[in-house]
Image (cartoon, rainbow, N blue to C red):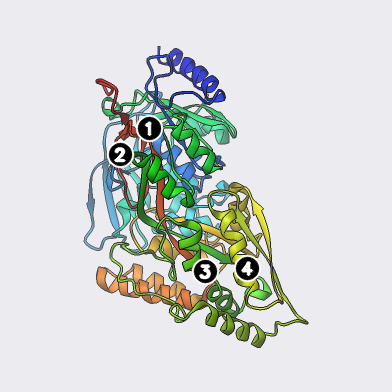
Amino acid sequence: MLRNRFIKAAFVTTSLLALAACGGGQPNNSDSITLHRGNNAEPLSLDPHRASGTWENNIIGDMFIGLYTEDASGNPVPGMAESFEVSEDGLTWTFTLREASWSDGQPVTAHDFVFAWRRIADPQTGAQYVSLLFPIAGVAEASRGEASPDQIGARAVDDRTLEVTLENPAPYLPGLLTHYTSFPMPSHVVEQYGDEWVRPENIQTNGAFRLADWRTNNYVHLVRNESFYDNENVCLDEVFFYPTVDNSAASRRVRNGELDLNMEFPGQQLEFLQREIPEYVRVHPFMGTIYFSLNTTLDQFEDPQVRNALGMAIDREFIAEEILQAGQPPAYSMVPPGVANYPGGVEVNWADIPVEQRRETAREILEAAGYGPDNPLRFEYTYRATGDNPRIAPVVQNDWSSIAEWVEPVLIVNDTQIHYDNLRAGDFQVADGGWIADYNDPYNFLFLGEFRSVPMNYSRYNNPEYDALVLEANRELDLTARGQMMAEAEQMMMDDMPIIPIVFYVNKALVSPRVTGWVDNVVNIHRSRYICFNDLDNAAE
């Protein structure tokens, strides 16, 4: 009956969206309770080991549950873990799993976690995001081909007991284990279908929803997983995720009732939206940074002074106040304010100097480095086609050109997926990007500067002193001392400036007042399992 129900709903939804009148979260003339979510970009993959974007996380996190998961407020709470014990030195965590099953009824076991973590550690998998699991013993070595994936610190004591050994104490581990890189995989399905395991006809999930259909550049369609351990508390029967690259168009679709929510809207529309539909507008800070990466493997960006010159020429205040217009604070550090166990206070030494004076200094630095009319500094600045990025690009181009007539930045725009593929491959000169915290700890930002974190370390920053200090900090059990050491490391990175922080994120979402269960939070994660509608009677029954 469920299959007939969602096929009918998908047909009605697609037809009505084509007419721009689908009615948002209406049951679509069927008995299904359906959510329509704008989701920023088209997924590159729904395989947790081949994904890397927040728009992919939104979908994957609806389908899978790790040892920990997020509550409606984005806080880490037990997921597949029923309980755990930690050794006195903080290096061994032993988890007891809850009784749960995959969507085909097969039990989820500790072996599925071990299988998944060995798979992501295997360099043949090509997981771009494997560095997030480097705190687990042996994962870094295995990912470089220096050890067998079978030797990583993950062991199934029995079907419901998982032992995890760490390289160093990790007070942030519960938050890390909410991330999709740590999710279990249905080993019986992956072994049968290989890379095709994630296709709708093959995939099995242990989360609230499972994949029914994926129409490229159209929608991803999820349906209720009735085998989910908390299914009785899930309201929705279906979720459609739409790639909303054009946020102005997506905002109109929310206002027209075609979408129940969209994860972004143009900042310059904030005043208009607050006036016209104030009950829809959700703006709040969250842990993320917009920054530019400079490819330090290229001759023109090998010198930290040259990189600082480009950084100091940018008028962040103008970008924040005149371009973005949604309260984004200008950023002169990588780690945003409010991160747990972190003293902050990191800033470049030229941050308080007026921007015109900074540009004069930048010119002097570049001239000292040998640039001038006879040797212009030419480089490509690549940016994403989504959101406000096309509006920021010409402003930054003008900022750099204002240093001197012989500074010649060229703008190149790319689709988001292609853009990040190029960053991970090192195929860029200067490029924009954004980083949103996977868990609430400074290391989640500072690992991006570790050389071992390439390809997520887009700039290929290579400072052994920085790497050693971050490693030492992660071995420190005293959280205050650890935070101070992390701040010293960040200051070192900011002085070298392989990345140029621009602004800290604020979340800008449009959410229909019909939607319930959406809670503004600092990690900007909103799982569909908590969402319902306020005009449905007994929707969760």
**What residue does disc 2 label?**
80
- The residue mark sitting in front, 4 or 1, is 4
Residue 266: image location, x then y, percent: 49, 48
CB under 8 Å between callouts 2 and 1? Answer: yes
* Amino acid identity at mark 2: Met
- Screen quadrant of the N terminus: top left
Work out how far the residue at label 3 is from the one at label 2, CA to CA, in angstroms. Answer: 39 Å
Quarter of the picture containing the C terminus is top left
- Relative to 361, 168 lies left or right: left
How packed mark 4 is, by other alpha carbons closer than 10 Å (few <14, some 14-19, many 20 or more), is: some
**Which is in the foreground here, disc 1 or disc 3?**
3
Residue 415, position in %: x, y?
Answer: 62, 47
Residue 82 in view: yes
Q: Nearer the viewer, residue 188 or 309?
A: 309
Secondary structure state at the residue bearing disc 4: helix
Q: Which residue is mark 4?
A: 398
Residue beneath disc 3: 500
